[in-house]
Image (cartoon, rainbow, N blue to C red):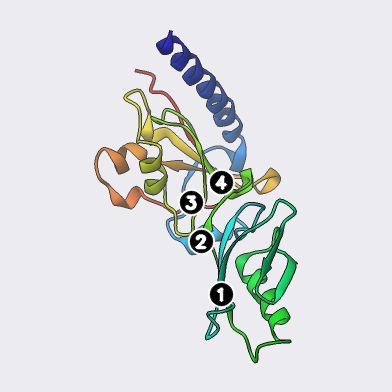
Amino acid sequence: MVKTFVHSCRMALLAVAAAALGACSTIGGGGLESAPTSAENAAAASPDYLVGPLDQLEIFVWRAPELSTNVTVRPDGRISTPLVEDMVAAGKTPSQLAKDLERSLREYVKSPQVTVIVSNFSSTLDQQVRVLGEAQQPTAMPYQAGMTVLDVMVAVGGLTEFAAGNRAVLIRGKGEERQSYRLKLDSLLRKGNIAANVPVLPGDVILIPESAF
């Protein structure tokens, strides 16, 4: 019974992956390019992380430990910190939120310097990395700065024995901006070719097809 359920779930995931792979073949005029190998090149295709409701933030005010705090973004998208009440945080990058806090704190502190770090994510789909198809545990996970394909594959438990890892595809962007790239997951995970490891970005989808044999 359990095996039947697992098989049905896997087949449903593969159907979604196959449909998406079919759509990918029309992107960029046919053949797939290798994914960008540097975070700088990859970042041009994706926006910065935006703070969302229920994200946990570390707020550090330089030379003012009494103003530094850890907060959770409320469901209404706002936060309250020492001396600053009900500031909108959702929809801003951590840097934008830090600058807004600095402006509010100038009334009380001379030249405040604020750093905001997202310590725990409760992200929307466009802030996640999703894995479909022949991974051990297909899932969606919050994006973290500096994340790579290897990090993602470790998190999902690697490939199944039926995976065609070197035919995997990374889909990046939305609408007319969407691009698709070939990944070489067999080379990375089974042969240890670290050159096949590339950065991932918020919103990326990794599709891993089943081998024909």
Foreground disc of the pair 4, 3: 4
Q: Indicate the amino acid at tag 3.
A: Val
Q: Indicate the amino acid at tag 4.
A: Gln
- For label 4, count other residues whose C-alpha is less than 10 Å away and answer few (under 14), some (14-19) or many (20+): many
- Which residue is at a point 57% across and 33% down the rendered structure image? 25
- Which residue is at a point 47% across and 13% down the rendered structure image? 5
Q: Indicate the amino acid at tag 1.
A: Ser
Q: Where is residue 95 in the image (x, y as percent from the top left)?
A: 61, 71
Question: Mark 1 sits on what residue?
Answer: 68
212 relative to 119, above or below: above
Marks 4 and 3, how far apart at CA: 10 Å
Marks 2 and 3 close (CB-CB < 8 Å)? no
Marks 1 and 3, how far apart at CA: 31 Å
Foreground disc of the pair 2, 1: 1
Task: Name the element at disc 4.
Answer: strand
Q: Indicate the amino acid at tag 2.
A: Asn
Q: Where is residue 100 in the image (x, y as percent from the top left)?
A: 70, 74
Question: How many numbered badges does the structure rendering display?
Answer: 4
The quadrant the N terminus occupies is top left
Task: Name the element at disc 3.
Answer: loop
Marks 2 and 3, how far apart at CA: 11 Å
Question: Mark 2 sits on what residue?
Answer: 41
Observer-nearest of 30 and 8: 8
The quadrant the C terminus occupies is top left
Observer-nearest of 195 and 105: 105
- For label 3, count other residues whose C-alpha is less than 10 Å away and answer few (under 14), some (14-19) or many (20+): many
Question: Mark 3 sits on what residue?
Answer: 200
Marks 2 and 1 close (CB-CB < 8 Å)? no
Foreground disc of the pair 4, 2: 4
Question: Mark 4 sits on what residue?
Answer: 128
Marks 1 and 4 close (CB-CB < 8 Å)? no
Foreground disc of the pair 2, 3: 3
